[in-house]
Amino acid sequence: MSYPTDVTDAQWALLEPVLGRGSRGPRPALDRRTALNAILYQARTGCQWRYLPAEFGRWNTIWKVFCRWRDRGVWQQAMDVLRRTLRVRQGRNPEPSMVMVDCQVTKGGRGGPSFHENHGKYRLCGAKKVIAIDYLGLPIGAMVHGARSHDVRAARELLDALLPNHPRVADVLGDRGFRGLAGPIAREHGVNVEIKHRDRLPGEFKPIKPLWRVEDAFAELGRWRRLARSFEATPASATAWVQVACVGWMLTML
């Protein structure tokens, strides 16, 4: 049985060099394309590991593959492949010259000790997602912190990880909540940080150009129900699921 989240042959041809079995070592117990389909299915539907359809194989084997790819940074590599492909198709340089950042707080859905923290403004216990996108709205990177982490700190950690791998980036855009980001990022990475302000009348809604694309990106990622709440116990797993959703979202654009 096939599902809407299953990758096509053309899509798998793009991702196989990153996710597929290499030429060394024994053949894996689970076909990597099947594992990818299972993980995308779970990210989209939000089901638990044990509730994965039986045709995908043993859930604990798929979970081990997910953890292995998470620890190796494979999901970020898959994001890079898809983003470059989509940019080239639109006549752009494969690498961006400008990125936009923003954060979103998600309520925690797990009891017991974890990285979830109380967020002062929204008064909920959860996690904070921070994403970076290019001018086209394509995700470049994502990271998840405890909800108490300040927006500037969360964005700085993400940019510190991303910018060394993107030498073409000359500008970083954010709203006024990222005012404290300008000095550190400019000094350490030599890029310009531009803070956009909303110019509007009282009671009027007016999106900030082009930062509305970040809100649109969060809306698209919100369709992936695994992200509706933060079910994970570690920032690494929570980050990986946001990256999986980014991969799935970009696959729909191909």
Image (cartoon, grey):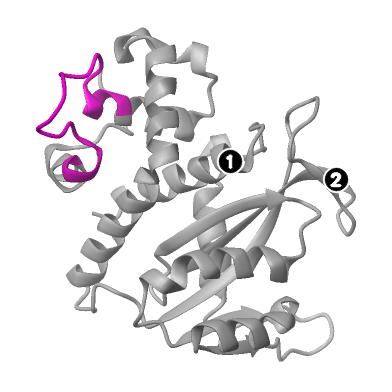
In the rendering, at what x and y percent does residue 251 appear?
A: 30, 48
Between 37 and 155, which is closer to the camera in this rendering? 155
* Residue beneath the point at 21% across and 62% down: 85
Residue 21 part of the magenta segment: yes
The answer for how far apart the CA atoms under marks 1 and 2 are is: 17 Å
Does 67 sit left or right of 6 as displayed? right
Between discs 1 and 2, the one toward the N terminus: 2
Q: Quadrant of residue 91?
A: bottom left
Q: Which residue is mark 1?
A: 238
Can residue 75 be seen from the camera position used here?
yes
> Mark 2 belongs to which amino acid?
Leu
Q: Which residue is mark 2?
A: 124
Residue 231 located left or right of residue 150: left
Quadrant location of the C terminus in the rendered image? bottom left
Residue 3 appears in the picture as rendered: no
- The range drawn in magenta is 16-35
Badge 2: residue crowd in 10 Å (few <14, some 14–19, many ≥20): some
